[in-house]
Image: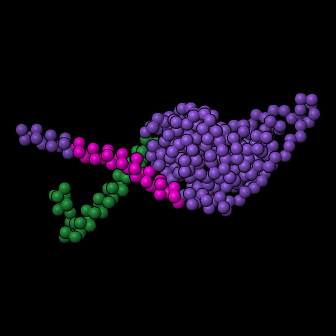
Amino acid sequence: MKRWFLSLPGPMAVKIVIAAVIVIVALVALFYFYDWIGTNLLDTGGTIG
Amino acid sequence: MVIVRRVVRAIGWTSIVAGLLILGFVVQQLFVTTWLSQQQQEALTEQAEEHFATVEIDEVEYVPPSTTGTVSVGTEEGTNGSISEGATGTTTERGEPLTPKKRTLLVESTPDKGTAFAIIRIPTIERLQDGWTVVEGVRLRDLKNGAGHMPNTPLPGQPGNAVISGHRTTHGAPFHEFEELNPGDIIEVDTALGTHTYEVRETIIVRPTEMWVTEPRDGAWLTLTTCHPKFSARQRLIVFAEMVDGPNWETIYA
């Protein structure tokens, strides 16, 4: 993880911004992935047809 | 020895990451979706109350299905009624022509998709004692916010079979305890017309494709549908309830 962070381009401030953006995008993507699995497998909302 | 240590370490990290992902899934589905739904419910309740105050209410003639061949209500543009089938007979037993007594049915205009227009309350189910807002439509985004009324079925309070679907385990899980419902339990639905009271007649479990549960019925019915068993979308738990009181009850059942 530390190695990945240090390999990001630019000075430390830029590294932090890039890392934060990547983490946020990953979390949002994960959220939608969870939502997709949940609504397709766990609970569709009980609709008929 | 070094290889074994590396393999064990890799398995260990993989297990930790997999565990965190599964934990995240459970937290997101059970808590985050519920929290988001509750936030939406507050806004939707306000929207429903505004809808009650502003929606146009019409009076249309209702002829009971037992006295004519075909009955249609809500024929004015933008109103939601139902068509009852299977009517028999246009004369009395003595052969005299039957003149149906004119009855007036209150109807409200069909809400736009996604609009909150009703509040459902079930006194015997704790999480529904204070009510849960019903929106028009059963798209995924509709059901994330509230229970959803199936388009092309009558609105609650109208003759026929009004169908409402809701989540069982996620997004606030409004229909979570539906297996506890028994015949005789009361379901109340507030709409712009007033409070419609239904009594549970039957609960059944069907496949998700069994459309017959949504078909029109004589009288005024409310059909609630949700996933079954809990944490699975394999089947549907269906609750059939019949109207026993409300602004249109006398008109429909007199």
Q: Residue B103's x, y, as percent?
A: 81, 46
Report the side of B68 relative to B112 (left or right).
Answer: right
Is residue B24 one of those drawn in magenta? yes
Give the extent of the magenta segment: B14-43
Q: Colour of chain A?
A: green
Could you tell me which residue is drawn at 72 percent across and 52 percent down?
B107
Q: Colour of chain B?
A: purple
Is residue B31 one of those drawn in magenta? yes
Could you tell me which residue is drawn at 59 percent across and 51 percent down?
B119
Way the structure is coloured: by chain
Depth check: give the residue in front, B104 or A23: B104
Could you tell me which residue is drawn at 89 percent across and 33 percent down?
B91
Could you tell me which residue is drawn at 68 percent across and 41 percent down?
B243
The main secondary structure of the magenta stretch is: helix
Q: Residue B237's x, y, as percent?
A: 53, 36
Depth check: give the residue in front, B8 or B158: B158
